[in-house]
Amino acid sequence: MSIKFEVIKTCKQSGARLGRLETPHGVFETPFFMPVGTQGTVKTLSSEEAMAVSEGLILANTYHLWLQPGMDIIKAHGALRDFMKWDGALLTDSGGFQVFSLTDMRKITEEGVDFKHHKNGSSLFLSPELSIQIQEVIGADIIMSFDECPPPYADDAYMKESVERTLRWAKRGKDALRTDQALFGIVQGGLNKDLRAMSAKGLIDLGFPGYSIGGLSVGETKEEMYEITKFLDGILPFDKPRYLMGVGAPDDLIENVINGMDMFDCVLPTRIARHGTAWTTKGKVVIKNQTYEHDTSPLDDHLTGWQATESKAYVRHLFKAGELLGKRIVTMQNLMYLKHLMKEIRQAILEDRLLDFRDQMKKTTNYFKTR
């Protein structure tokens, strides 16, 4: 089985979608958020803990796993799920975003990309076909087409050339696939709606079981991001899942669910956790601030889980003392909060009140106050 997807309900107030995604390793209600397990681990957490703070589906990174530990070691264990002892479902990116972030170290050709190892400088090459082969070894339920992720403000001529090449690469990757893994096409085109439409329609013509939206949350404004997702909502097939890549801030999740998106991932919740920023049901908390030095209240008295019951003063103490437990606590808190938030979003869709839910969040939290 590849995947099956259906839209169960459309919110009458907002137009947001409640769906059901069936994979070989789990069935999930959409919209949902996926924690990022770049190197076969959600940073600081065991696989059991990652399962507790997720819906049971996480993302792994093709580029990093290809370089370390390498495909031979993963293959010797069977697949990545066996290597990391993960009982849930897996999604992999294509490696394209990482390669194209190496701006000064790569050369794009029609065949693929020549680039340098980001640590030791050795020469590497990645093509649409090789990206698929790596993802086949990793064994994820859902995999991505190899794409170029150009800067959002690249000129239209370059962006058009990039989109056309990404479409050709998508076909090559689709032709190379030898498994029943669900391969998603990735819509690119920056902030140019004509190019986004061309990219989306080209991928739809090729026929994929799902469609990803790349090249957002990479430097553009939030309003520009929302304008593109709202535009694509009217173009992408209604009966296929839409995956907005690299987006995970609470306000962005709500706004993009309203714009018809179903799946999300982002390193943000775990990255900011390691620097002491906690997301709670009452808003963002910078736990290292002195205001929490004597605060005996729990980190989040509206969430379950051991991490939520620790006092703010204790968590602050752990950060000030350089103890790793502090990073683990806030990592679990941020992911548990997003799991809670997405559940509340799904319930609001079911009850046709997602806009009311967003308005209430604007009044009771500080997540929308940074615009």
Image (cartoon, grey):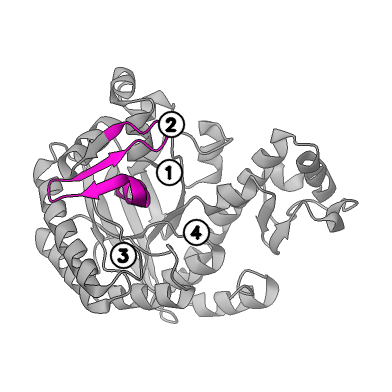
Q: For the residue marked with disc 4, what is the amino acid?
A: Gly
CA–CA distance between discs 1 and 2? 9 Å
Residue at 20%, 35% in the rendered image: 133
Sequence-first tag of 1 and 2: 1
Q: Nearer the viewer, mark 4 or mark 3?
A: 4
Q: Which residues are magenta?
A: 95-123
Q: Secondary structure at mark 4?
A: loop
Q: Which mark is residue 86?
A: 2
| Closer to the camera in the image, 316 or 300 | 316
Q: Nearer the viewer, mark 1 or mark 3?
A: 1
For residue 212, side relative to residue 336 (left or right): left
User: In which quadrant of the rendered image does the N terminus lie?
Assistant: top left
Q: Position of residue 332 (x, y in %)?
A: 62, 44
CA–CA distance between discs 2 and 3? 27 Å
Q: Which residue is mark 4?
A: 248
CA–CA distance between discs 1 and 4? 13 Å
Q: Position of residue 79 (x, y in %)?
A: 31, 27
Residue 199 shown in magenta: no
